[in-house]
Image: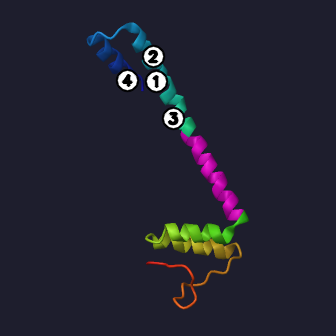
Amino acid sequence: MKEIEVKLRAGMTQNGIPHDPRTRSCIISSFALYGFPESHSASFALLAYASAFLKVRYPAAFTCGIVELSANGLLFSRYARQDAQRHGLKVRPVHIGHSEWKWYP
């Protein structure tokens, strides 16, 4: 960020931009160093918490959602099914005569 800031300030000086806006650009640099990772870590923490809550409280629905989202990534859905079985869920294969949910492989 420091290299980008130096180039930014030099370009602003060449283009005749007054000192005050250049000072404000430092605020952007400071935010980039802290705010960007901070905001992403906060949203990741929320997603991790919500996922853990759903997995513990609603394991069948959570597993169905993971398998449904990963229908094209069958390897990942296999791991999700194995994890569900390790946690006590009974996983049945899709059966055209008994399943109520449309599933398109």
Which three-letter amino acid code belongs to the residue tagged 4? Glu
Q: Is residue 19 above or below residue 3?
A: above
Q: Secondary structure at mark 3?
A: helix
Quadrant housing the C terminus: bottom left
- Cα distance, mark 3 to mark 4? 18 Å
Identify the disc placed on residue 24.
2
Residue drawn at 34 percent across, 20 percent down? 8
Q: Give the residue pinned by disc 4.
A: 3
Q: Is residue 26 above or below residue 89?
A: above
- Cα distance, mark 4 to mark 2? 17 Å
Q: Give the residue pinned by disc 3.
A: 36
Q: Is residue 43 above or below residue 76?
A: above
Tell me the quarter of the picture where residue 23 sits: top left
Q: Secondary structure at mark 1?
A: helix
Q: Main structural element of the magenta stretch: helix, strand or loop?
A: helix
Left or right: 52, with 19 as reference point: right
Quadrant housing the N terminus: top left
- Cα distance, mark 3 to mark 2? 17 Å
Q: Earlier in the sequence, mark 4 or mark 1?
A: 4
Q: Earlier in the sequence, mark 4 or mark 2?
A: 4
Instruction: State yes or no: discs 2 and 1 in contact (Cβ < 8 Å).
Output: yes
How many numbered circles does the render carry?
A: 4
Left or right: 39, with 29 as reference point: right
Q: Give the residue pinned by disc 1.
A: 28
- Closest to the camera, between mark 3 and mark 2, is 2
Q: Nearer the viewer, residue 97 or 81?
A: 97
